[in-house]
Image: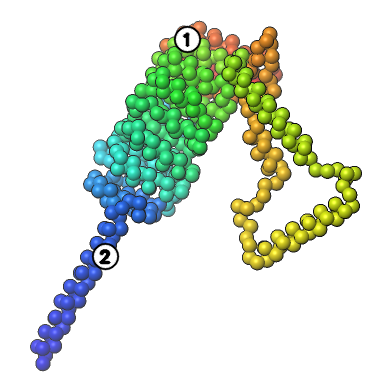
Amino acid sequence: MKKRMEKVNKEKGTSGLEEETSQIAGLNKQNTSRVQNIDDYQCTGDLRVDIPELCASVGLKEIPDVRLITTESPSTERAPDGSHEQAFSESCMVTWSPKPCLHIEMENEEPRSVKRVRISGWKVDEKMAQILSKALPSLSNLQSLEMWQTGLTDPILTSMKNTVFMCSKLRTVFLEGTPIPENSYHILMAEDSLIAHLSLRNNHIGEDGARLISLALCKSLLSLNLAFNAVGNVGATYLAQGLRLNRTLLYLSLANNHIGDAGAAQLAQVFGPFALTHEEIVERRRELKKKEQLDDTKKDEKPLTNQTMTMTGRKEDTKGEKKKTSDTKLLQGKGAKSDGKDKQPSVKEQETDEVVETQSPLLDPEIQTIAGKVIYPGNTTLLSLNLSGNELTQQSLQMFLQSVACKGQEASSIFLLIGTASLQIVRPL
């Protein structure tokens, strides 16, 4: 009897183990099928979890490590003395890894608080770009993306641009040491871009690339680093044209770009009064006409005065207001919540929006007509221009001094780097 019971227990134990093993195998099979399609994977916001899963979903065998950045990071602020020029590259060399690796910096100990991601020294191919397009937008605190020598192609850059634009808090993008034959870096400056600090150092950007960038300078961009490229005098001329009516860019680095006195002369003219071109004058007339139409519309929409309002109208308006108030209270009483999404903007907010919409550099009140020419006061926004390492002579310095000569008591300043010398130039606002 005892032997029979032991035999039964043994059979039950064996069958239970087999059942448990089959269940585990089934779960593993489900998990595997769950990540076979990258679109079906739901990111957790923790890169140390998401990256391996996403790599498995696209069949990537070499899974990048995810490591914390332990060294001090270079500041994203654009120092006018040019000290930031080498900080990023030096930091990349410190964190460089021969194998694919994502270096991350977190706001705190929470795994989902990643604020900075760096990819340096390894190629980002189509599969990796697909993985990043899924993982990065899930980082709700991501503020900086730094890529160094990643071997991007034009299609992959387009994919990365779409990824960057999906990251709501991402304001700093470094894309350095990654030449792209098509010179399509300007797509990072599209109208819907929120990038404030963009570094495109050492990307072999030539004259055509400079032309595309000058046409694409967006309203959100505060600093642009184009050091160690090859824009030359022609490229500098294109960029000068882009700076003529720009009113957002604060810092620009054109260090080591084979620029001579001819290119510097075009840049210097931007800082002093200059005559508008025919195309700019035509656009100014359009802006003035739009402004006049808007002013006329505002006059027509002015509320009636007390003298023109009848007692009946007052009573009707009062009743309407009371009814509207009661309806609002009724909705709120039924549980409607005011989360601010449906809140109508105040009159002050509407006026501010209208000012922003109609505000244009071509409507600057300082514009004057002198000797039949429409004279613009010049760019008074750019605070720092780095031209060190170029082929400039004393002549360039004199041209800048003449352009920004102070003519008033109130003044701002531009920090100019030419060669090995730095100069603080005071100029009128």
Kindly identify the amino acid type of the residue bearing the numbered disc 2: Leu
Q: Is residue 69 left or right of residue 33?
A: right
Q: Find residue 212 and report its horizontal and vertical position in percent.
A: 45, 24
Query: Residue, x 49% and y 7% (percent of image)?
Result: 394
Q: Quadrant of the C terminus?
A: top right
Q: Find residue 366 and report its horizontal and vertical position in percent.
A: 68, 20
Kindly identify the amino acid type of the residue bearing the numbered disc 1: Ala
Give the residue furthest to the left: 3
Q: Earlier in the sequence, mark 1 or mark 2?
A: 2
Which element type, helix, strand or loop, lies under badge 2?
A: helix
Query: Residue, x 64% and y 25% (percent of image)?
Result: 286
The residue pinned by badge 2 equals: 27
Which element type, helix, strand or loop, lies under badge 1?
A: helix
Choose between 49 and 344: the one closer to the eye: 344
The residue pinned by badge 1 equals: 262
State how far apart marks 1 and 2 are (Cα): 70 Å
Q: Find residue 234 and report its horizontal and vertical position in percent.
A: 44, 14
Q: In this picture, is 56 found above or below 210?
A: below
Query: Residue, x 56% and y 29% (percent of image)?
Result: 248
- Answer whether residue 305 is visible to the viewer in this image: yes
Q: Is residue 282 left or right of residue 132?
A: right
Rate crowding at label 2 as few (under 14), some (14 to 19) or many (20 or more) other CA atoms within 10 Å: few
The quadrant where residue 123 appears: top left
Rate crowding at label 1 as few (under 14), some (14 to 19) or many (20 or more) other CA atoms within 10 Å: some
Q: Is residue 189 left or right of residue 62?
A: right
Choose between 320 and 243: the one closer to the eye: 320
